[in-house]
Amino acid sequence: MDDIRQGIILKGVGGFYDVLDSVSGQVYNCRVRGIHRKEGGVTPLPGDNVTFKVIDEKDRTGFVDRIGERKNEFARPPVANIDQLAIVLAVRCPEPDLGLADKLLITCEAKDISPLILVNKIDLDEDGSAEYIGKIYRKAGYRVILISKVLDVGYDKLHQELKGFRTAFAGQSGVGKSTILNRILNNWAMETGEVSERIQRGRHTTRHVQLFELDVGGFVLDTPGFSAYSVCDVQHTELASYYPEFREVIGECRFTSCSHISEPGCRVRELVEKGKVDAERYKRYVQFYRELKEAYDNRYRR
Ligand code: GDP
């Protein structure tokens, strides 16, 4: 009988894929079966759950047999099946871009990804920014961790929150994504990549998207490239459904097509007035709604 194994693609370089055997924990360097390519099959991505066959046990080579259905996928960086996004903000240096954080949260809601907010550099906090940011997002129902490499706080909590998830990192440049990732990789990454590192060494110099397995289970994605998100593929009419703090009253407004901006009898605005929804986050909602609607209204214009 064929020895078909289950695995996950850790990285792909020039048509070769490092596949982590889910049972043995060994990494196999795999090509994609010729027939799969001829049939117009999808190109494998890091993060893909695959079945594969071993060609040579000693050399740890094989070929990818089948690519499992994807929960989500991204072009930049090229990766599939992300289930947690760590959204990194700094209290300052650079000033926190809460609009970007909100957009990343919308993307998470739309792509079935669990967001985790990291408020970094709290050692630089002089005016209570960390608590202010934390409060906004906790109120919306999100998990928030305050973190600082200088004070050495938040990292243990982060370690626990990574458990079992496939986590990518996003945020403005300079907020500390690389610093946090390095700390994770140096302390909590398994040595699973070792075999394939040896195979690849010297052949390629550029950095590729790579998943690293964690000692607590789960993976982190080694790429700081998750910053260029947009909400372009979200419809303005659906925008409100991506705000968890609106959800309890959605569908209860006087008008079924309520945009939650100016219509009478709007239950979302009622929540804002009562202070149950953060007023600043609501203001940014209104702005995104207008941006998306304008793009929609102009969709046939050039
Ligand atoms: P990235 O662009 O998001 O990857 O950010 P980096 O990891 O390169 O960090 C940008 C700068 O912030 C570097 O100089 C880091 O040393 C610094 N940094 C990272 N974490 C902290 C922190 O907790 N506190 C302070 N004060 N600086 C930090």
Image (tube, helix red, strand yellow):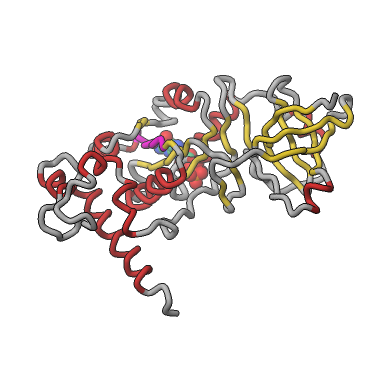
Q: Quadrant of residue 259?
A: bottom left
Q: Above or below — where is 259 with respect to 26?
A: below
Q: Is residue 234 above or below residue 196?
A: below
Q: Is residue 40 left or right of residue 212?
A: right
Question: Quick check: 85 left or right of 251?
Answer: right
Residue 300 in the magenta stretch? The answer is no
> What residue lies at 73% left-to-right and 20% top-to-bottom?
24
Give the x, y percent position of residue 6. Answer: 71, 28
Q: Which residue is at a point 46% across and 40% down the rendered structure image?
A: 176
Instruction: Say whether residue 5 is left or right of residue 219.
Output: right
Query: What's the residue at 59%, 42% (across, down)?
Result: 70
Q: Nearer the viewer, residue 149 or 172?
A: 172
Q: Is residue 21 visible?
A: yes
Instruction: Please identify the quarter of the rendering in which residue 287 is found.
Output: bottom left
Q: Position of residue 133 (x, y in %)?
A: 28, 40
Q: What residue occupies the far bottom of the structure in this picture? A: 302
Residue stretch in magenta: 115-123
Q: How many marks?
A: 0
Using the image as rendered, state which of residue 183 and residue 251 is in the foreground: 251
> Quadrant of the image for the C terminus?
bottom left
Q: Main secondary structure of the magenta part?
A: strand
Magenta stretch: includes residue 116: yes
In percent of width and height, residue 84 lies at 48, 36
For residue 23, above or below residue 108: above
x and y percentages locating residue 95 in the rendered image = 34, 49
Regarding residue 130, the answer to whether it shows in the image is no
Quadrant containing the N terminus is top right
Q: Residue at coordinates 39% horizontally, 27% vertically from top-left?
A: 151
Q: Dividing the picture into quarters, in which one does residue 187 lie?
A: top right
